[in-house]
Amino acid sequence: MPPTQPTDTSVRDMVTRRHRRRRTLLISTVATVVIAAAAVVGAGLVRTNNSDPGKAPDRAPAGATADKAGLAVSGGAVRVDLYLDYLCPECRNTERAIAADLKGLKAGRGVRLVYHPVAFLDDYSSPGGYSTRAASAAACAADRGRFEEYSSALFEKQPPERGPGLSDEQLISTAEDVGIKGDAFTRCVRDATHRPWVKYVSEAAASRRVSLTPTVMVDGKRLDMTGGDPGGTLVRAVREARR
């Protein structure tokens, strides 16, 4: 179902808050057009920038790409990039809509699927920071070999915007639901081990002019996933890229 536009006030408030952050990001013409024309309720928005995201953190989760800006979960000839925020309802909807098609594409080793768990909506939880905490926990799950299962579980339990988000204890219990056990995951979540990595992934995404979530790319080409058949859109794009 096509998303609806948010109020001008909600977008303006987000822009104002992000302007006050330590590292101010310059608004590009492309991002301005995207935010004005395609901003939606439940979509994560961020300013894009032309600057380098800086040095990647020393520690990244298992499966991180060579540049540490994403997390590869499968191998294949065609690269598919998914930019998702765990507080973004449209990300949840997209994840559900394309799950079966992604499973088929991965089964045939047709795609190299790379996730980018970003924290564009940190300001939309109270207290702020849930997007980062959830993405960091997902990275902890990657270390245990359960990233995709845990990522889907986070969307199933997605809290409403403006609320506190899932607590650390809830993030830990969610891992048990997908078969992650042991103290290593618990320590990883409580210590926010992958927080620096999430920050880097988010800044790397912004530097690549990814201005909202969800964003889906096939071999670097952005797809319009707002139609009635996002899974079909993805499959057709992958087939075209193979030619």
Image: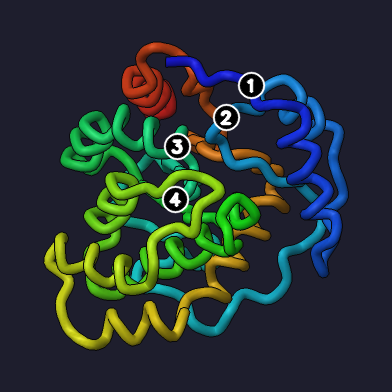
- Residue 232, quarter of the rendered image: top left
Q: Which residue is mark 2?
A: 41
Q: Position of residue 143 (x, y in %)?
A: 30, 74
The residue lying furthest to the left in this view is 179
Looking at the picture, which amino acid does disc 2 mark?
Val
Amino acid under disc 3: Pro
Tell me whether the residue at label 2 lies in contact with that at label 4, contact meaning CB atoms closer than 8 angstroms. no
The residue lying toward the viewer, choosing from 129 and 31, is: 129
Residue 123: image location, x then y, percent: 65, 54
Say which label, 1 or 2, has the lower sequence index. 1
- The residues tagged by marks 3 and 2 sit, at their Cα atoms, a distance apart of 8 Å
* Residue at 47% from the left image edge and 67% from the top image edge: 133
Q: Are marks 3 and 2 in contact (CB under 8 Å)?
A: yes
| Other-residue count near label 2 (Cα within 10 Å), few / some / many at <14 / 14–19 / ≥20 | some
- Residue bearing the label numbered 1: 5
Q: CA distance from mark 1 to mark 4?
A: 20 Å
Between disc 2 and disc 4, the foreground one is: 2
| Among numbered discs 2 and 4, the one appearing first in the sequence | 2
SS assignment at label 3:
helix
Image marks 1 and 2: residues in contact by CB distance under 8 Å: yes
Residue designated by label 4: 86
